[in-house]
Amino acid sequence: MSDREARQDSLHDVLGGYRGAVDATVGPLAYVAGYLAGGKSIGWGAVAAGVVTVGVGLWRWRRGGKLTAVLLGALGVGVATMIALYTGRGSDFFLARLAGNVVSALAWSVSIVARWPLLGVVVGAALGQKTRWRKDPWLLRGYQRASWIWVGQYAIRIAVFTPLWLADATTALGLAQAALTWPLVAACLALSWYVLRRALPEAHPGIRHPVTAESLAETPDPDRVS
């Protein structure tokens, strides 16, 4: 491993891995299992999803996680359940998730164009940098490029979920949710980290150390860095 690679933290390290993505698959799968076991009953599906989501959340909490995560998980299941019960369509349990992906894709795209890429905002907050990363032209450029990978992640889900939702394919939606959560997040983290790392010049100290204004004069123009 080179010195530069040793100084670099991956996005997996900074953002905490795939725990949230794994947990996000449990509720939908439990919903589908309860829905089918109850003879396509939205109520049974909702109960199963709620019990499993809260159970996993409490287990995480006892192992040092935040109670907020438990409450947010329960709230998400509650909202999804109310939508499905109101419309009477089992597939509408996933409508909020579909809408969330649409909003996320738009928000990430706008943030890139506005030169406030959300990947930089999230990583900067996780590293306690506030907005210092925006003063580094290489990090700003890297976060902009890497954020498009996250837009693509949401776009893939939208492209898969939309026809399944229109067809009221509840079981397929649950399986698609599971398939496009942890595996897709893992691929997104790896690819966006590769893009971000490629955007930084060889001498860059890494994402934890934005280049300061004083050092800019001694560093090559980023537009000339391949």
Image (cartoon, rainbow, N blue to C red):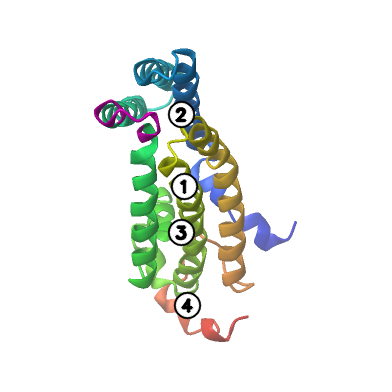
- Image x and y of residue 225, in percent: 59, 82
58 versus 224 height, above or below: above
Q: Earlier in the sequence, mark 4 or mark 3?
A: 3
Q: Which residue is mark 1?
A: 163
State which quarter of the image contains the C terminus: bottom right
Q: Say which residue label 2 marks.
A: 28
In reply to whether residue 174 is colored magenta, the answer given is no
Which mark sits nearer the N-terminus, 1 or 2?
2
Q: Residues within 10 Å of mark 1 (few under 14, many from 20)?
A: few
Gap between marks 1 and 2 measured at Cα? 18 Å
The residue at the point 61 percent across, 53 percent down is 190
| Gap in angstroms between the C-alphas marked 4 and 3 | 32 Å
Q: CA distance from mark 3 to mark 2?
A: 22 Å
Callout 1 secondary element: helix
Asked if the residues shown at circle 2 and circle 4 are in contact, with their CB atoms under 8 angstroms apart, the answer is no
Judging from the image, what secondary structure is the residue with disc 2 in?
A: helix
Q: Amino acid at mark 3?
A: Val
Task: Read off the residue under disc 3.
Answer: 151
